[in-house]
Image: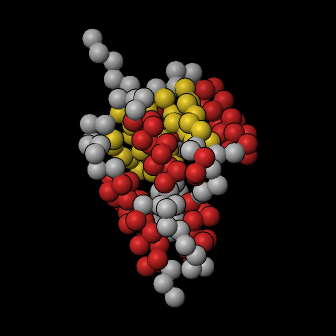
Amino acid sequence: MSLTTIAVYPGTFDPITNGHLDILRRSLSVFDKVLVTVAANQRKNPLFTADERIQFIRDALPEFGPDRLDFAVSDGLLVAFCQKVGATTIVRGLRALADFEYEFQFAHMNRRLAPGIDTVFFMTDERNHYVSSSLVKEVASLGGDINGLVPAPVEAALQAKYKK
């Protein structure tokens, strides 16, 4: 009997950055299937719709089909979602010490709520340790160069959104 390992990679991904994609590619080298869970989170006033964010990721990783990479939109309790889809692992990326402190709390709470679900952390590539979706949006909104920080279609979409 073969066991399929399913991991959930949750986030807002508004927009997806090259740092997110690095974590996602590395996750796909470890797990049989990764389910990217896009938070609809309207309280954060996302710049892009959930469907647009999912399409950006699909376009950036065309080599992974739905048998390896799938998507869902969720705003509920993450561990409940993991249990529903049979995932045993939550994937998170760490950029800096501040990320660790924040993620450490959530990992322990998730473990308390669902002891069968673990959180695995991937350290970001050193080229992306300072990159965040918020920072990319801010630089783009001010007309700055975001080339190399996000996939080309995301760069074009940001330029179109912030065209003055």
Residue 152 placed where, x, y %?
Answer: 40, 65
Q: 116 or 152, which is in the foreground?
A: 152
Task: Kindly tell me whether residue 83 is visible in this rendering.
Answer: no
**Left or right: 86 as drawn, with respect to 80:** left
Q: In which quarter of the image is the N terminus?
A: top left
Q: 38 or 130, which is in the foreground?
A: 130
Residue found at the far bottom of this picture? 164
- Rendered position, 40 above or below 4: below
Q: Who's the residue at 50% across and 56% down the image?
A: 17
Residue found at the far top of this picture? 1
- Rendered position, 155 above or below 108: below
Residue 33: image quadrant is top left
Residue 53: image quadrant is bottom left
Residue 153 placed where, x, y %?
Answer: 38, 66
Residue 142: image quadrant is bottom right
Q: Who's the residue at 49% across and 29% down the image?
A: 89
- Rendered position, 164 above or below 39: below
Q: Who's the residue at 33% across and 18% down the image?
A: 3
Residue 96 placed where, x, y %?
Answer: 69, 45
Q: Who's the residue at 38% across and 47% down the image?
A: 72
Q: 71 or 133, which is in the foreground?
A: 133
